[in-house]
Amino acid sequence: MKNKNTKRYYLSICDNHDTGAGIFFETEPLSVISEERLNREKITRKFPKKSINLNFVYTKLNPEKIERIIIGSRNTPIFFLRLFNKYHAEQQAVSSFDIRLYLYFYFQILLNITPLSYFDSQLSAILLKRKFRKKITMVDHHLCHAYSAYSTSGFRGKSLVITADSGGDGLCLTVSIGERSNLKRIYQESVLSSISQYYRSFTEILGFVPSKDEGKVVGLAAYGNPDLLLDYMKKKLYFNGIGFNKNLFQYAGTRAKIEKELKKYKREDIAAALQKNLEEEVCKFISHWIKKTGIGNVYLAGGLFANVKLNQKVHELEEVENIFIFPHMGDGGLCIGAVMAYLQPKPSKITTLYLGLEFSDEYMLNIFKKHNLDFKRLRNAPAEIAKLLAKGKVVARFKGRMEFGPRALGNRSILYRPDDEDTINWLNKRLNRSKFMPFTPTILAEDADKCFVNLRGAEYMAKYMTITFNCTEWMKKSCPGVVHIDGTARPQVLGREDNTEYYDIIWKFKELTGLPCVLNTSFNMHGEPIVCSPEDAITSFRKSKLDYLLLNDFLIKN
């Protein structure tokens, strides 16, 4: 690892699912952008050329100052083939049941269990260095995930760090112990036991897009009866006393067979059984490792933990003392995890996730002129927006730096009152989204205990919409527009120090209505990434026919 007496700039690249790049001064992220926001392909797998270039433009950093490029992958099947050969097995295989996908996974396993892995990574580094003319460090995929959670947890005692996803560098699951600034891996499983592939395959069976729509399955599951198919799901995925059954190849080429077996069941019941089995088996696994290590501080990363209902069940385990999920838990977060794994700092809390692009007033005025848009400049935007929300208007807010990660945290958000019970129907329809998908509340931190049950031990992660909580009876009655059918919500608990102007909007709204939260949903149409530029915002605003759009302090009416 690096000489700790020097301070350097680093370029970090993620080229897995959901590609992106970031520029760091030591461990401080100066600019981090997901490629999907720029090429407008949700969870894109294309090499992040646009992200790399715009990071340099935004930071005004001379590329010559970059000391090293750090890549969140150890082997070439993800990175090298993408950059030097347009053919890529995982991109070509659209279906979760396509045999080519499983051959790709098998190739990853072979790399890990033979000397090929060493030669492969060495060849990658040599060729990449020639292309970029910089020192290259390639870091193990799951080590990046683990450090993304551990180094940003803010906890310096012993920690149990668990990563899980569809697969990366031949593995799908790791367990590590963190202490001081180091991680020691004590358990791992190959992609043969991929929990995420189990969930991904049934996502496709349910008619959704795998690797993109798993969140829809979570939302749909609340409407079903899990008991009708729970025994069936337990044969597909189960905890075997230390890890999980080898389940990967049971899906290769078997779509027609599974569809026939499930033909008589409703989608809601399939989703409910899938979700309940996942929760039960993963909780057994985590409980086992807590008891084995005696460590109750649990930190999670990897795409599996994008499942907010699963995260709630883990939090509710009696053995768990504290829990933290890295906010960009999927592969898009590897560009932060790679830097942390390379530098291995002592754990500290994230100071902000507003790490993307922002746009000047001058830029906005040019856009208005180009599109012949009428606008009003607000002198006190928080107060004016609060008044509009109190009147029942829908306001899209585009201000400040774009969020990094899958959640809109107020700067690229659509806002509305939380007390309209019918919102789930008409607003989802307006945004072309599935009618069963719930909306999120952003709530003032001082009122969180009034609205949610069992926050203790999860307060920090509740800032980033990574977990659901059971709602209090007051919350269910007063804010039904942001409470799911199962009585839960996935909040953003907001302190004034997190986002001053957004906090002030909610504070003013509370003064007008008595309600301590607003409905917050991501500013995008269905199937599209969250808006990045003012042009994206105007396009989505017009399509969705929302009432108002706030661009910086400029208000546009539809």
Image: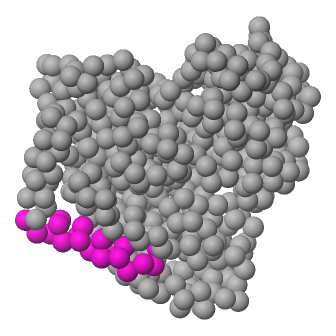
Expressed as whole percent of the image width and height from the top left, the position of residue 513 reads: 89, 26
Look at 68% across and 60% down and name the residue there. Answer: 219
Q: Quadrant of residue 542?
A: top right
Residue 342 is left or right of residue 241, and the answer is: left
Residue extent of the magenta highlight: 96-115
- Give whichever of 459, 261 is nearer the camera: 261
Instruction: Indicate left or right for 268 with 545 as reference.
Output: left
Question: Residue at the spot x=69%, y=65% of the render?
Answer: 220
On screen, residue 455 versus residue 419, left or right, reads left
Q: Is residue 185 above or below residue 553?
A: below
- Residue 410 x/y as whole percent: 65, 30
Left or right side of 53 for 393: right
Instruction: Name the residue at 82% across, 41% down.
Output: 545
- Secondary structure mainly formed by the magenta segment: helix
> Can residue 135 be seen here?
yes
- Assign the N terminus to one quadrant of the image: top left
Quadrant location of residue 514?
A: top right
Percent x, y for residue 446?
A: 69, 25
Residue 331 placed where, x, y %? 40, 50
Q: Is residue 43 above or below residue 172?
A: above
Residue 102 magenta-highlighted: yes
Q: Quadrant of residue 262?
A: bottom right
Residue at 78% x, 52% y is: 428
Is residue 309 visible in the rendered image? The answer is: no
Say whether residue 276 is magenta: no
